Amino acid sequence: MSFILRSHLARFALKNVRQASGVSMESAEKTMKLMRVLSLTVVPFSIIAVGINAYMIEQEHSKHAPPPYKDYAHISICTKRFPWGDGKHTLFHNPKSQGIRGKGYDLK
C-alpha cells in the first residue's frame, strides 16, 4: 500500500518538476512582447494617475489651517544653534508646517 502511494506521489512530483523546468521560446517571446506593451502603455498612465491623485490630495490638504502651535520642551531640544541664519531655523525650514521653539509658526 505504501509503495503505491509513494510511487504516485513521486510521479506527481516529477511531473511538476518537468513542467517547471522551462518554457518554449515561443512562450518566452509572447511574454516579452506582452511585458513590452504593458510597460509602454499601462505604466505611464498609472504614473500619471498616481501623480494627479497626489496633487489633488495635496490641494485638499493645503486648504486647512495648521493646528495651533504647542511648545513641547521634549520635542524641540536644541543645545546648539544652527550655523546659518538666526540659528533657530533648520536648513530646510518650512514656515507653514514647522514652528520655532518659543515663537510658534513663522507666518508673515
Image (cartoon, grey):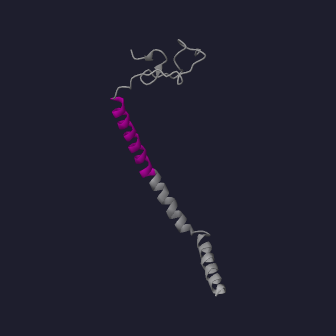
Quick one: 42 or 63, which is closer to the camera? 63
Task: Work out whether 12 lies above or below 68.
Answer: below
- The quarter of the picture where residue 16 lies is bottom right
Q: Quadrant of the N terminus?
A: bottom right
Give residue 108's position: percent from left, percent from top.
39, 14
Q: Quadrant of residue 3?
A: bottom right
Q: Nearer the viewer, residue 87 or 55?
A: 87
Q: Residue furthest top?
A: 86
Q: Residue at x 59, y 70 (%)?
A: 20
Q: Position of residue 24 (x, y in %)?
A: 57, 69
Q: Residue at x 38, y 34 (%)?
A: 58
| Image-based side of 60 in relation to 43, left or right | left
Furthest-right residue in this view: 3
Of all residues, the one furthest to the front in this rendering is 73
Question: What stretch of residues is rendered in magenta?
Answer: 40-63
Q: Residue at x 56, y 21 (%)?
A: 77
As for residue 62 lying within the magenta part, the answer is yes
Q: Residue at x 46, y 23 (%)?
A: 98
Q: Is residue 78 above or below residue 61?
A: above
Q: Magenta span has 29?
A: no
- Looking at the image, which is closer to me, 25 or 10? 10
- Where on the picture, by quarter, is residue 74? top right
> Residue 96, percent across and down?
41, 23
**Residue 102, position in %: x, y?**
48, 15
Magenta stretch secondary structure, dominant: helix
Query: What residue occupies the far bottom of the structure in this picture?
Result: 1
Count of labels in the image: 0
